[in-house]
Every structure is written in structure tokens, then in C-alpha cells.
Amino acid sequence: MVMTDFVDIQGVGAKQVVLRGDGSQLRPLGVFFPWSDDSCTCGMGGVQAEVLVDFSFADEPTYDEMIDGVTFQGGDVQVYAETELHDLDGRVSNCIFDMLHNPFEGYGAPTFGVLMVHVFLGPCRPTRAGWRATWTSA
């Protein structure tokens, strides 16, 4: 589900409304996971994953989009927000994040309950501790 500007979702209660992912609905743009593949990527962008609620396109600065009163089950990422150029504002309230693996019900455990990333696609440089993102000036 993609949250867009000026749209709120309110369930009747977290025990009555369940958003469940079964791995079949992958995010078309991919997901930016915060781990590296030992190259100079400082994270892995474009990883195919199922996202239950995506706040990445709710970029209206004067309004906070909201989801309220639901349970999230399954999916790879239950609530996701990714940005590079602007701030994102949104609210998740009165929700349950079911992080259990339940193959008998047809869903697995998510990798992340909430994943918010500020993608920096700039250059990296090696340090003693590994790769680190740095700003460069022209």
C-alpha cells in the first residue's frame, strides 16, 4: 500500500484489521537495505522486497499522512520510508507489528518492522573500520 499526500487510513482496531504480506507483491523500485555487499555502495539499493505500507511518496510538507489501528503481518518490510531530496512526515499509531514467523498461516517473519532510510548515493572512501560515505566538493 502506497501512502500518498492527504490520505489517511484508519482501521476499526488492530485486532480486527490485518495487513498481511505473503511475498507476492514486491515494491517495483526495490528497497534500500542498510547493509553493504563489501563494495563501495554503503548499502544495497534496489533489492526486491515486499513492503506493506510505503510512505516514500507522501512528501507534502504541510500534512502528516497517518495509518492507525491495524496489525502488520509478514512482508519483508512492514512500514517503509525512503528519501534523498526532501523530508517525509507520517504517523503510525495504535498498530501492532507482528514479527513472528508463521508458515502455517502463509507468511514469514519480516526483515524490518519499520525501515526509514535517507539514501545518500555519493562516493565512499575506505577507513580502518570499513567503507564510509563522505561528501566531496568540486
Image (cartoon, rainbow, N blue to C red):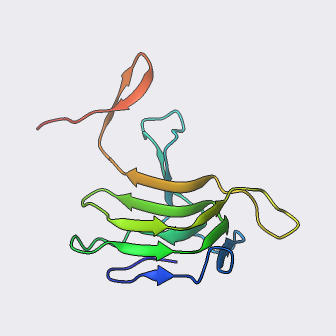
Left or right of 42, for residue 137? left
Residue at (30%, 56%) from the top-left corner?
Answer: 84
Left or right of 136, for residue 30? right
In the depicted structure, whether residue 115 falls above or below residue 62: above
Among the 4 quarters of the image, the one containing residue 89: bottom left
Q: Is residue 68 visible?
A: yes
Q: Is residue 27 visible?
A: no
Nearer to us in this view, 50 or 66: 66
Among the 4 quarters of the image, the one containing residue 88: bottom left
Which residue occupies the extreme top position in the image?
128
Residue at (52%, 40%) from the top-left corner?
Answer: 35
Q: Position of residue 123 (x, y in %)?
A: 30, 38
Q: Position of residue 122 (x, y in %)?
A: 29, 43
Which residue occupies the extreme right position in the image?
104
Q: Position of residue 132 (x, y in %)?
A: 37, 30
Which image quarter holds the C terminus?
top left
Left or right of 83, for residue 138? left
Nearer to us in this view, 8 or 110: 8
Left or right of 32, for residue 78? right
Q: Position of residue 56 (x, y in %)?
A: 39, 67
In the depicted structure, whether residue 48 falls above or below residue 131: below
In the depicted structure, whether residue 7 falls above or below residue 75: below
Count of residue discs: 0
Residue at (50%, 74%) from the top-left corner?
Answer: 68
